[in-house]
Amino acid sequence: MVFGPDSYYRRPFNHIIATTILNETVPGFQPNDGIVLAEPGRSALVFPSADRLPTVLFNYRTNDDAQFRRPPVEFLRRPFGPELTGPLLQNLFQQFEKADDHSSTPRTRW
């Protein structure tokens, strides 16, 4: 409010972040293990917490804001395909889809 309307200063970052707290640990990993799956333009990270189950964070590049008019589980798999996912990524997608609460947001910079 001090500097004026957001439209003067807000610029798209062309990334989407989707995150949730997992309902269970990732098979084959300990609750305090961190996991990083990264490729150009997309990543999935699992990071531990001292007081709850691990959190998963998906991140990918996009300039399609229409994705936010659909439920997150619909648009999340597309940037990680069309190849078949391995068991680790498949488990993370399934846990995201079953989560009680998840959020996704376009990333912008100020």
Image (cartoon, rainbow, N blue to C red):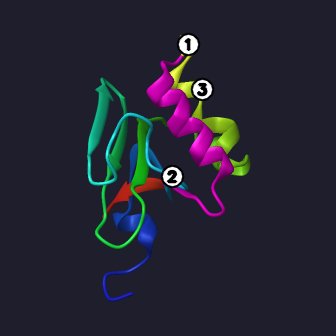
Indicate the quadrant containing the N terminus: top left, top right, bottom left or bottom right: bottom left
Q: For marks 2 and 3, give the CA distance.
A: 24 Å
Mark 1 vs 2, N-terminal side: 2
In the rendered image, the vertical position of residue 18 relative to residue 44, given as above or below: below
Mark 1, Cα crowd under 10 Å, few <14 / some 14-19 / many 20+, is few
Quote the CA–CA distance across marks 3 and 1: 11 Å
Is residue 106 or residue 93 the one in the foreground?
A: 93
**Residue 86 is covered by the magenta coloring:** yes
Q: Position of residue 73 (x, y in %)?
A: 66, 42
Q: Residue furthest top?
A: 83
Between tags 3 and 1, which lies in front? 1
> In the rendered view, would you say 35 is above or below 57?
above
Q: Residue 100: x percent and y percent?
A: 66, 62
- Residue situated furthest bottom in the rendering: 2
Q: Residue at x 58, y 59 (%)?
A: 102
Q: Earlier in the sequence, mark 3 or mark 1?
A: 3
| Residue for badge 1 | 84
The amino acid at mark 2 is: Glu
Give amino acid for label 1. Leu
Q: Residues within 10 Å of mark 3 (few under 14, many from 20)?
A: few
Q: Examine the image and state in which quarter residue 90 appears.
A: top right
| Magenta-drawn segment | 85-105
Identify the mark at residue 78; answer none if there is no mark: 3
Q: Secondary structure at mark 1?
A: loop
